[in-house]
Amino acid sequence: MSAETPIRFGILGCAEIARKLSRAITLAPNATLYAVGSRSIDKAAGFAKANNFPPGAKIYGSYDAVLDDPDVDAVYVPLPTSLHIKWAVLAAQKKKHILLEKPVALNVAEFDKIVEACESHGVQLMDGTMWMHHPRTAKMWEFLSDTHRFGQLRNIHTCFTFAADPDFLKNDIRVKPDLDAHGALGDAGWYCIRAILWANNYELPKTVVALRNPIVNEAGVILSCGASLHWEDGKVGTFHCSFLSSLTMDIAAIGTKGTLHVSGFVIPHREKEASFSTASETGFDDLVTCWVPPPSDHIVTTDLPQEALMVTEFSRLVGIVKNGSKPEKKWPILSRKTQLVIDAVKASMDKGFELVHIE
Amino acid sequence: MSAETPIRFGILGCAEIARKLSRAITLAPNATLYAVGSRSIDKAAGFAKANNFPPGAKIYGSYDAVLDDPDVDAVYVPLPTSLHIKWAVLAAQKKKHILLEKPVALNVAEFDKIVEACESHGVQLMDGTMWMHHPRTAKMWEFLSDTHRFGQLRNIHTCFTFAADPDFLKNDIRVKPDLDAHGALGDAGWYCIRAILWANNYELPKTVVALRNPIVNEAGVILSCGASLHWEDGKVGTFHCSFLSSLTMDIAAIGTKGTLHVSGFVIPHREKEASFSTASETGFDDLVTCWVPPPSDHIVTTDLPQEALMVTEFSRLVGIVKNGSKPEKKWPILSRKTQLVIDAVKASMDKGFELVHIE
C-alpha cells in the first residue's frame, strides 16, 4: 500500500465528540471514515448515516469487531476515560494506530501501559488535544519562543470553564466517578495544563499545589478547581477549570519582554479565523497615561478546522509508520506530561492542598 | 466660600507620580494647583514650573509649610508608604482633606490611625486608585452586576506586571524595605486586589493563601508574588503582580452566565478610549467548532483622563464637606479592605504559605 492511500479510520463508540471527529476525518485529505463500532449495531448504523460515512463503510455491533477488521489502519477512541486502558491496549495489540481522547488515562501508571503496548506493537499514539494543531498555535509559539519579542516566560494563567446544563451535571460521563473520575480537571483542566506546559516548551514544573476549596459533586467528582505550578526559577503557572461557569478559554502568558493573550484557545471563536494579541517591549508615555506601543491583534486563518489538521498530522505519521519508520514519540510524551500534572494536582487535593513534587 | 470655588491642592513632595496628578488637578474643573512643598525649595520651585502651576502658586521648602497654609484645602500625598502615617495624620490634624497614594499604609493598624485622624477632624480621605474613576469601570460594573448577562461571579484572575529597569530595581522607593516595605505586592498587587474586591462588590474573602516561591530582593522586598482568595461559596480569585515581567494589566472575571475581559485595567492602552470585552450566555455551534455568539468588544471614551476624574470626584466630596456635610466613608472603607487583603497575603507568606483567615 502506498503512502498516498488515505488512512482508514475505525471509531470506537458513538460519543458526541465523535461527530466532530468524523467530520474532521472526512475533511482530512489523507484519511477516510472506514468503520464504526458500537455495542448497539443500530446505533452504529445511525451514527454512520448521520455523519456521512462513505458507501461501503463497515458498521459493527462491537468495538472488538472494529479491531478485528484487518483493513482498519487506525482507531479513534472517544470512550470514557476509565475504558481507555482496556481498549487502547487491545487496539495496539491488534496493530491499530490510536487517536485517543483526553484525558488519556485515569493516571500515569495506566497511561504507561498504553504507551508500552503501542511501542511493543509499533503503532502511533496521539491524544485528541486538537488546538495543538491549529496554525494559530504555531504562530503563538513563534512569539513565545522569540527571545527578542517575548523574552523568558515568567507567569502564565490559563482557564477553561463552561456552564454545563442540569442534564450534563446529572448524566454526562464527565461527572461519573466510574467513567471520568477526574471530572472538570481531566476534561477542561487537561487543556489548561497542556497550555501551561506548551508555553514552557514542555518543561515540567517542579512542584504543584492545588487551590483550596474545589467544588465536587455528591459522588466526589470535581466540578471546579485550580492549581498553581512552580518552576525552580520562580516561574509560576496557575489555572482554573470548571463546569459551573460561563464559557471561557484563556491563555495569558507573561514574559520578561512580551505578553500573549488569547481567548478561545481550545476552540476559536470562529472556525476559519482565530485571533490572539501580543504586546512587546511596551511601556508608558512620559506621564504614564497610556501604553506605548499598545498591544496588537493578530488573526490566523485556516481552511481546514483544527480537528481536521490533527487528523491530517496523525494520518501523516501513521503513513510514515506504514512505510517502515518508527512511530513519532513526541505526542505520547506530551500526553504523559499532561497526565503527570493532573495526577499531581489530584494528589495535592487528596493531601489537603499540600505541595506535591513532580519527579 | 461657595461650593463652586475650586478646591486648592497642596502637594507633599515631588514624586514622579505627582507630575501626572498635577496635570489631573489642572484638568479637573473643580480643583486648582495651589502649593507644593519639598524638603528642597529649589526642587519644589522646579516642580511647580515644570508642571504648569498657576502664577501665585505657593512654593514651600517643607511639607509642614504646606499643611500650615490656611488656604490649602486638600493635600495630595505621594510620599513613600512608610511616611503615610506621619503625614496623613498631621494633614488631618491641620484639617486638610487627603488624597493619599496607594498602598495607603504599611498595614491596617497604621491605616486605622489615619482614618481615625480624618474622622475626628472631619476631613475627606480617598486613595489614589485612579482606575476606579474611569467611566469604563462603571460600564464594566454594569455588566458584572447584571444577573441576566453575567450571573454570579465564580472566578476572577487579575494581574499587574511591568518590567522595571535596573535603576528602578536598585533605587526606586518601591524596592526599599524602609520606604515601601511591600514592594510589588503593595504597588502593583494593590490594584490586582482592589479589582478582585471590586468585582465581588467589595465582599471580603474568607481566606487567603499566598502562592509559593515569591521572588524577593536582597533586602527581602517582594519583586513578584501572587495569591489565591477564597469565599465561602467556592468562589476563587487569583492574582499575580511583578516588577520583573512585561507590562500586563488584566482582569478576567467569570460568572455563571458571562465573562468579562479587560487588558490595561489600571492604565488604558489609550488615554481617551478604553476597551473591554464581554461574553454572555455563549455556547458552541452543533459540532462544537465555534462560539455562538462570539464575545463582543466595547469601547468607552472619556474627555478627561481617569486621574482628572478622580480629582474631580474627590474635590466634589471635599466641596460637600466644606458646605457642612460629613465626609464620604465609602472610599476609606475600600482602602481598608484592600489593605486588609495585602496584610493577609503577607501574613500567609510569613507563615510558610499557610491559609490565613480574614475576620
Image (cartoon, coloured by chain):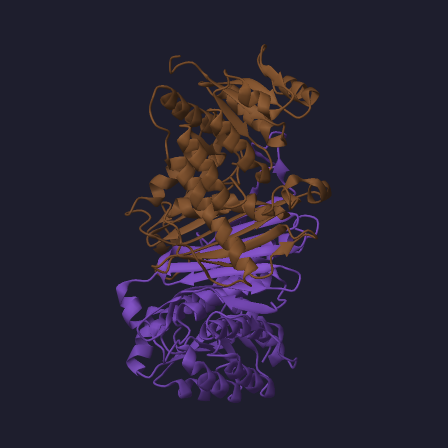
Chain colours: A purple, B brown
Please provide percent x and percent y for residue B150.
33, 48
Please provide percent x and percent y for residue B292.
36, 52
Q: Residue furthest top?
A: B55
Left or right of residue B84, residue A85 in this image: left
Residue at x 37%, y 36% (from the top left corner): B330
Residue at x 43%, y 62% (from the top left corner): A241
Image quadrant where residue A329 sits: bottom right
Left or right of residue A124, residue A347 in this image: left
Q: Is residue A265 visible?
A: no
Image quadrant holding the N terminus of chain B, namely: top left
Q: From the viewer's side, name the closer residue of A178 and B105.
A: B105
Residue at x 38%, y 45% (from the top left corner): B202
Q: Is residue B231 visible?
A: yes
Q: From the viewer's side, name the closer residue of B227 and A133.
A: B227
Please provide percent x and percent y for residue A281.
65, 43
On screen, residue B330 above or below B30? below
Left or right of residue B306, residue A295 in this image: right
Please provide percent x and percent y for residue A29.
52, 66
Image quadrant where residue B124 sits: top left
Residue at x 61%, y 43% (from the top left corner): B180
Image quadrant holding the C terminus of chain B, namely: bottom left
- How many marks the image carries: the answer is 0
On screen, residue A109 above or below A25? below
